[in-house]
């Protein structure tokens, strides 16, 4: 679902297209090379778990097995989402030489994006964990001591001190509730039927929500372009794409659109009736259908959404570290004076 090496989520440029596995397969198809030979070339280029699975598929085809039988044999070696899509394409009679390289690129790009997100969010998560530790230590150790000392002298406390006394009384319970909420959402995300609601919630969050939306639409458009190129009907293309989407909310909407396409509606008309699809995507699809160039329009839309996602990633990498510094620094700059200002007044009074 997510693109190439340097950009982490963008598609390869036209200048470098000849070097991509998808381009190599396209050339192999044009030169009428056997499918097993093209698969081996793709497997060697791809590497990793997916590359080994692709080469195993080539071995099965060389052994005389049919495509469906070969996929049934080696499918456990593919990642789950890719496995489901390949099986659906084979059953629908799609062109595997068109589909497989594009989908293997999707899997690789998804892994690259996960690595980039891990790198971006590691620092904020570590800082947040340290801040939670400081708040809990203050709530259970520091603040009770200060409250007991100031109460023993009957001091009239500043509003800031009173606020932090109140804050630290409720902070542990609030942190516990937040932790339980995150754990509950994680369980829901792994539960069939409930995951779509968690994914809808993720799409509504600040910072990460726009990235989730852009990448979901880029992945959907890219896979639809691949399946329509492979000459699958629109309904089947949508069902295959839905099987590979990480966003279950978008996948459910795609399945609903597939039903409308099976009834004879155009893809643009079916999508326009749903609020889960960006209007820009619908507009580009409509233009592609009107000009009989739907795969090209979908590829253009995928590139556009990937570019949006790349900019959102860059924004996150630039904005999160200073945001965490402001958050921690602001807390300490307010907390420390609020705790020690009454002590200074107490010392002045005693002197």
Image (tube, helix red, strand yellow):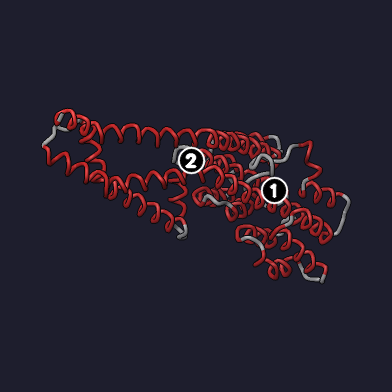
Q: Residue, x 44% and y 50% (percent of image)?
A: 198
Quarter holding the C terminus is: top left
Q: Percent position (x, y) of residue 300?
A: 67, 36
Q: Residue furthest right?
A: 31
Residue 113 visible in image = yes
Q: Percent position (x, y) of residue 119?
A: 56, 45
Disc ID at residue 209 = 2
Residue placed under numbered mark 1 in the picture:
226
- Disc nearest the viewer among 2 and 1: 2
Mark 2 neighbour class, 10 Å CA radius: few under 14, some 14 to 19, many 20 or more: some
Q: CA distance from mark 2 to mark 1?
A: 26 Å
Q: Residue, x 73% and y 62% (percent of image)?
A: 52
Residue 326's quadrant in the figure? top left
Label 1 residue SS: helix
Q: Residue, x 53% and y 36% (percent of image)?
A: 316
**Horizontally, is 129 left or right of 318 in the view?**
left
The one of 293 and 179 positioned closer to us in this rendering:
179
The one of 251 and 10 positioned closer to us in this rendering:
10
Mark closest to the chain's N terminus, 2 or 1: 2
Q: Percent position (x, y) of residue 345?
A: 19, 29
Q: Residue, x 23% and y 36% (percent of image)?
A: 163
**Horizontally, is 8 left or right of 331 in the view?**
right
The one of 99 and 316 positioned closer to us in this rendering:
316
The one of 259 and 17 positioned closer to us in this rendering:
17
């Amino acid at each position: 679902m997510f693109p190439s090496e340097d950009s982490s989520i963008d598609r390869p440029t036209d200048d470098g297209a000849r070097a991509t596995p998808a381009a190599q397969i396209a050339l192999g198809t044009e030169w009428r090379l056997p499918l097993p030979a093209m698969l081996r070339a793709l497997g060697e280029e791809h590497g990793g778990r997916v590359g080994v699975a692709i080469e195993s598929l080539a071995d099965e085809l060389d052994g005389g097995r049919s495509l469906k039988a070969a996929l049934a044999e080696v499918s456990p070696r593919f990642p789950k989402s890719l496995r489901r899509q390949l099986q659906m394409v084979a059953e629908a009679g799609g062109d595997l030489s068109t589909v497989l390289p594009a989908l293997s690129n999707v899997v690789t790009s998804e892994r690259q994006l996960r690595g980039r997100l891990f790198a971006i969010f590691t620092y904020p998560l570590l800082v947040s964990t340290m801040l939670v530790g400081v708040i809990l230590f203050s709530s259970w150790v520091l603040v009770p001591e200060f409250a007991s000392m100031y109460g023993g002298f009957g001091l009239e406390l500043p509003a800031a001190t009173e606020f932090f006394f109140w804050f630290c009384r409720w902070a542990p319970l609030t942190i516990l509730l937040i932790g339980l909420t995150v754990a509950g959402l994680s369980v829901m995300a792994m539960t069939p039927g409930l995951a779509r609601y968690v994914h809808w919630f993720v799409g509504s969050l600040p910072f990460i929500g726009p990235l989730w939306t852009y990448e979901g639409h880029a992945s959907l458009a890219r896979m639809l372009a691949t399946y329509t190129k492979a000459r699958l009907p629109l309904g089947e293309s949508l069902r295959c794409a839905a099987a590979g989407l990480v966003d279950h909310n978008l996948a459910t909407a795609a399945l609903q659109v597939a039903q409308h396409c099976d009834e004879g509606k155009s893809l643009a008309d079916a999508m326009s009736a749903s609020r889960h699809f960006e209007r820009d995507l619908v507009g580009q699809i409509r233009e592609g259908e009107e000009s009989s160039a739907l795969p090209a329009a979908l590829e253009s839309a995928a590139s556009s959404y990937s570019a949006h996602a790349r900019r959102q990633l860059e924004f996150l990498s630039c904005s999160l570290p200073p945001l965490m510094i402001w958050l921690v620094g602001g807390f300490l700059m307010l907390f420390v004076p609020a705790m020690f200002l009454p002590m200074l007044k107490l010392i002045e009074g005693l002197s």
